[in-house]
Image: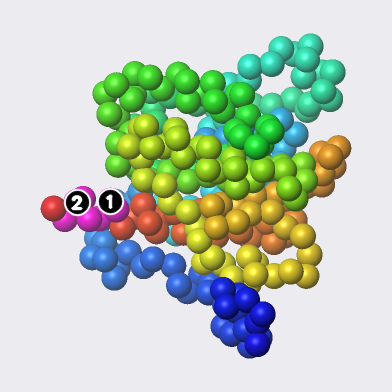
Amino acid sequence: MSCCPCLPTKGTKLRGIDDEIRVQELGGGNMSKPKVYIVFYSMYGHVRALAQEMKKGVEEAGGECLLYQVAETLSDEVLKKMSAPPKDTDIPVVDVHTLPDADGILFGTPTRFGAMCAQMKAMWDATGGLWQGGKLVGKPAGIFFSTATQAGGQETTALTALTQFTHHGMIFVPIGYTLGEVQFDMSEIHGGSAYGAGTFAGADGSRMPSEKELALAKHQGKYFTNVTKAIKAGRQST
């Protein structure tokens, strides 16, 4: 028996993909594809790797997915000193005025001292006009993240991001423990939590996302899309 009542006992079937919200159960079987944006910042490629895997999950769940990166705020000189690789020019920089076109938005960020990076915060700071017009009210929002270490602030990054979602009236969609075979697995270290997918980059940035971390990212894409479908279906039926 588990020493903690909140943990699964040995032999317990862990929750997983079969326990996701099913749109057909909520009356959303006949509707257009939900459009999901994945907006991220990635200096060394860790968050980008999660975003690309998440995109697969969105598409497998029947969503249309567009990847965007936020604008860089550091100079080329500084980036060179930090040994940052060139940006992926195949992924466009987001124009915040297009965010209202999405049915739901997933945001990916590396952590800086327990909160989102300055580049992601700068993007949010540019959304004043959207806030004033209530353009993001009621839109589902999710978050995923990368930290250097296990105690690097993944959950505080999610919690502090809630202030952005809240002021815009967005609906935060956490993943809970809906992929138990990864989230309850203690055989190896892995990022991510009930708030969203995550990865540990290592102090020198050399550790790329593991298979388990990528699996959680893909799952989040599926789960988020199903929730977005359900919300969209409910609105279309009223």
* Residue drawn at x 77%, y 46% as measured from the top left: 149
Mark carried by residue 121: none
Would you place residue 133 above or below residue 223 in this image?
Answer: above
Q: Main secondary structure of the magenta part?
A: helix
Circle 1: element type:
helix
Whether residue 95 is visible:
no
Q: Residue at x 63, y 54 (%)?
A: 192
Whether the residues at callouts 2 and 1 have beta carbons within 8 Å, the answer is yes
User: Residue tagged by mark 1?
Assistant: 232
Q: Colour scheme of this structure image?
A: rainbow
Occupied quadrant, residue 234 = bottom left
* Start-end of magenta stretch: 231-237
SS type, badge 2: helix
Q: Where residue 236 is drawn, which disc sits there?
A: 2
Q: Tell me where residue 226 appears, x and y as whole percent.
A: 39, 59
User: Disc 2 residue type?
Assistant: Gln
Neighbor class of circle 2 (other Cα within 10 Å; few <14, some 14-19, many 20+) is few
Q: Residue at x 37, y 32 (%)?
A: 167
Q: Residue 3, percent across and down? A: 66, 80
In the rendered view, does 202 fall on the left or right side of 154?
Answer: right
Q: Position of residue 188 (x, y in %)?
A: 78, 64
Mark 2–mark 1 Cα distance, whole angstroms, equals 6 Å
Q: Which quarter of the figure is the N terminus placed in?
A: bottom right
Task: Report the amino acid beneath label 1.
Answer: Lys
Q: Residues within 10 Å of mark 1 (few under 14, many from 20)?
A: many
